[in-house]
Image (cartoon, rainbow, N blue to C red):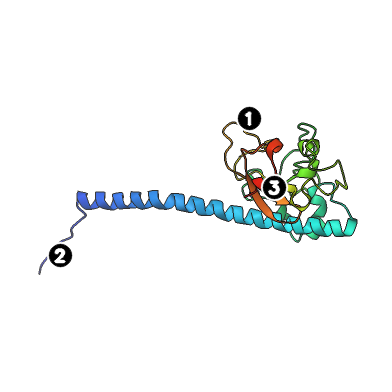
Amino acid sequence: MWVRQVRGFTLMELLTVVGIVAILTAILLPVFFNARLATQRTVCISNLRQIGLAVRMYRDDYGELPPYLSAVRKYVGDVRLFICPRDPQAGQHQVENTLGDAFRLEGNYYLPSGVSYTYVPNWAIARLLGWWQAGPPYGEGKWNELTPLSECHWHWAGRFNPTWQTDRVTQGRGWVLILTLNGAVRRIRVETSPEEFSPERYY
Ligand SMILES: [Zn+2]
């Protein structure tokens, strides 16, 4: 009879395995993180497109734009469409009357499940710059169908910023997703100030 020899790992083998696992983790973690961000952005763009369709239907029925974004909820199948997956408060924002634009981000004021997206016609700066008339009916928009109707800011910022300007938001970098009146979703750099915005700034 012979005793089967049980051999453990040598120190070198263990270190090699640990090293390989560490390298794989370092390579794959950013990939997973970026994939998650991309998925969230895709969901958000889909939400905005469906909100755009709902606004179009509202406009066809009433002959004017809605007074606030969630006023189109009866044209939206699922109220979760109003929530961006990147919004850390999931739409549960308090209405803030910043620079005279109450209801630009209505939060849960009208819709208890909450709203992550802003409504540009209710933004005082947008009216001041002539993007929209005070409304409803708000008019046709300065650039007609290319005029920004709604925005998502959650892909570059963890909290809502009343302007998308870097001079008031330090180190703002990234993209604002823009739903235009024609129902398309475009993006602009957050560094673009409202004063210098025009549809040529869309990517
Ligand atoms: Zn979003």
Q: Is residue 13 above or below residue 171?
A: below
The response on whether ligand 1 sits within 8 Å of label 1 is: no
Most extreme residue toward the front is 200
Q: Is residue 116 visible?
A: no
* Image position, residue 91 (x, y; %): 70, 46
194 relative to 2 in the view: left or right: right
Name the mark nearer the viewer: 1 or 2.
1
User: Mark 1 belongs to which amino acid?
Assistant: Asp
Query: Which quadrant holds the N terminus?
Result: bottom left
Kind of element beneath mark 3: helix
Residue extending farthest to the bottom is 1
Whichever of labels 2 and 3 marks the residue nearer the N terminus, that label is 2
Residue at left 66%, top 47%? 200
Residue placed under numbered mark 2 in the picture: 4
Q: Tag 1: Cα neighbours inside 10 Å, few (<14), some, or many (≥20)?
A: few
Q: Secondary structure at mark 1?
A: loop
Residue of label 3: 199
Distance from Cα at disc 2 to Cα at disc 3: 77 Å
Check residue 12 in the rendering and tell me which mark sits there, or answer none: none
Q: Residue at x 65, y 34 (%)?
A: 165
Kindly indicate the quadrant of the structure image that contains residue 197: top right
Are there few (<14), some (14-19), or many (20+) residues within 10 Å of tag 3? few
| Residue 20 visible in the picture | yes
Q: Position of residue 93 (x, y in %)?
A: 72, 40
Residue drawn at (21%, 54%) of the image? 9
Q: Which residue is mark 1?
A: 167
Amino acid type of the residue that numbered disc 2 sits on in the rendered structure: Arg
